[in-house]
Amino acid sequence: MSDRIHTLSGYFHEYQKSVTQPEEFWARIADSFHWKKRWDKVLQWDFEGPDVKWFVNGKLNITENILERHLYTLGDRPAIIWEANDPNEAGRTITYRELYHEVCRFSNALKAKGIGIGDKVIIYMPMVPEAAIAMLACARIGAIHSVVFAGFSSSALSDRINDCGAKAVLTSDGNFRGGKKIPVKAVVDEALEKSSVETVIVYQRTEQDVTMKEGRDYWWHEVIEGEADTNTAEEMDSEDMLFILYTSGSTGKPKGVVHTTGGYMVYTKYSFENVFQYSPGDVYWCTADVGWITGHSYIVYGPLLAGATSIMFEGVPTYPDAGRFWAVVEKYKVNQFYTAPTAIRALQAYGTDPIEPYDLSSLKVLGSVGEPINEEAWHWYHTHIGKTKCPIVDTWWQTETGGIMISPIAGITPTKPAFATLPLPGVQLSIVDPEGKELTGNSVEGNLCIKFPWPGMIRTTYGDHDRCKQTYFSTYKGMYFTGDGVKRDHDGYYRILGRVDDVINVSGHRMGTAEVENAINEHPLVIESAVVGYPHEVKGQGIYAYVICDMTNRTEENLVNEIKATVSKIIGPIAKPDKIQIVSGLPKTRSGKIMRRILRKVAEGNLDSMGDISTLLDPEVVKEIIDGKK
Ligand code: PRX
């Protein structure tokens, strides 16, 4: 039986079935994969632990479902089409057969370096096919990958290396990004100063000078030399860890979200095929970076499990000019295009001239992910890119959910601008008020929770299960709490309103305000800081920092620049505050708690509705903050 939804009534039917008979529903989907041993039980769960297991005791290797599975039927079909940063550099096409051999060869090389089941491998690489090959090679030998976005600083990288106890790092000499050549190996060297990493494998991309440490560092092209291009995939358990991906939360350092093998495999393929209505032979392009969950689930795993052709793009939307995305769409006749609202808004600012030269008639589906899409951007995308004939799938999900949770099914679910519309089959949503009371019926607004497990969900936070419990399963008893606010309108459609915790979303990148504050506080002259988000035309949200500093012998301008540099060094350029206001005090309650509500209002420029400030320790400080607003 096909797992594809073809009609709206078919969607409702499948949804109903997934709720009333979840185990039968998911068993049917999972049966279309290759298992080395079928599972004993579909689902075992409690949200108290939390302890969730899907396809209990099932044995498999996810890469057999990507490689061996497609080898004879789709061997000549392009699996990955790679487009370089520079449009004049030739692209690469890797067929399913070639992908099979490349993954086998590299996984043999990893094994030869002593890497095997359960070892953690950090991947800190540019957007080249080898990044995907590296992920799959790890999965093939049972090693656990943790991809770190190559824009993170050495200190952020080192935190992640140490947190998961990585045995190896896979990286490159450098990285091309727009007009820039970025050193990558040098960042790795700095991160490795205090670590137990035994092996570093370096893919040569920019041919810039790097230092290679004897006995630790090896060139990618040298380690694969002479390795066989076939092997047998390790037999893994459904619940064996597939990968760890670090993401920011409202407190402390980023946490390692753990995804396991069987459920993630079933969920990413199912959601990919249905949401995008992928048909065999289509060319699909997701513009994300493999350093984020979108790249994991919808550049690599979902599409490749489905036998799709997935484009990997090394560059940026505005290089060499603002028509680049559309040039690539025309060049490869892209059918499904998936990007973030921040990219749409950035391109919108250039007007429609950069689009005109290109033929976008191949497009069938447009996708949006990572942050709420405002109505104006939605209409621009729909009109100028989709020429009003392509449905937009506004897909809501998170690193923790593994795959898309709320989204239209392309061309089937009627869309409404800025609405993610309806949950996918298997996703049981609940809107709760601050006390945890479920708000039933339509036309309600509250906090978004999920009350039943789905196969792609987070299993734990690496090395700290209690943190997983506290963060996601303790706010509302018996439910997974997403951290997002949501509205269900009169039609029962869902619209995501944004985070209700201390997480901000800057250009679709998730950032904890506490994490940015900690980085700011590393500057020796900073006494205290408070960070909030504010609406930003292109980025969705910008970072606004209020900072108390020792100003002796300093000008405000050079302090602000130094603070920005400190944040870049500790986290990476993506976390640099857009605005820094030096203040003499912060609004605090008598018990010493910072009143973020007030800081948010000032940053938003929402000065009329400050609310009650009489409980503040020093109400005068609010006036100073308003007067000095950036
Ligand atoms: O606030 C939601 C927002 O991004 C958060 C998840 O971020 P991350 O784990 O980095 O994953 C991003 C890519 C899946 C969510 O809690 N978000 C994601 N997609 C949407 C969204 N907000 C509104 N609409 C969306 N389509």
Image (spheres, grey):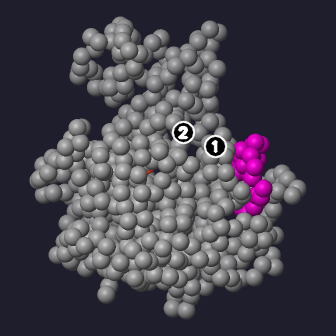
Mark 2: few/some/many CA within 10 Å (<14, 14-19, 20+) = some
Height in image: 613 above or below 483? above
Query: Is the CB atom of the residue marked by disc 2 within 8 angstroms of ligand 1's nearest atom?
Result: no
Which quadrant of the figure has residue 8?
bottom left
Tell me which residue sits at (55%, 56%) in the image. 244
Tell me which residue sits at (36%, 12%) in the image. 590
Checking the image for residue 159, the label placed there is: 1
Is 520 positioned to the left or the right of 170 in the image?
A: left
Tell me which residue sits at (81%, 79%) in the image. 226
Checking the image for residue 253, the label placed there is: 2
Report x, y in % for residue 315: 57, 58
Mark positioned earlier in the residue sequence (2 or 1): 1
Specify whether residue 305 is in view. yes
Height in image: 405 above or below 545? below
Secondary element under disc 2, as helix, strand or loop, is loop
Of 172 and 611, the residue lying toward us: 611
- The range drawn in magenta is 180-206
Say what amino acid the circle numbered 1 marks.
Asp
Secondary element under disc 1, as helix, strand or loop, is helix
Tell me which residue sits at (53%, 43%) in the image. 254
Residue at the bottom extreme, as displayed: 72
Q: Are marks 2 and 1 in contact (CB under 8 Å)?
A: yes
Report x, y in % for residue 468: 45, 47
What distance separates the C-alpha of mark 2 from that of mark 1?
Answer: 9 Å
- Which image quadrant: the C terminus? top left
Say what amino acid the circle numbered 2 marks.
Lys
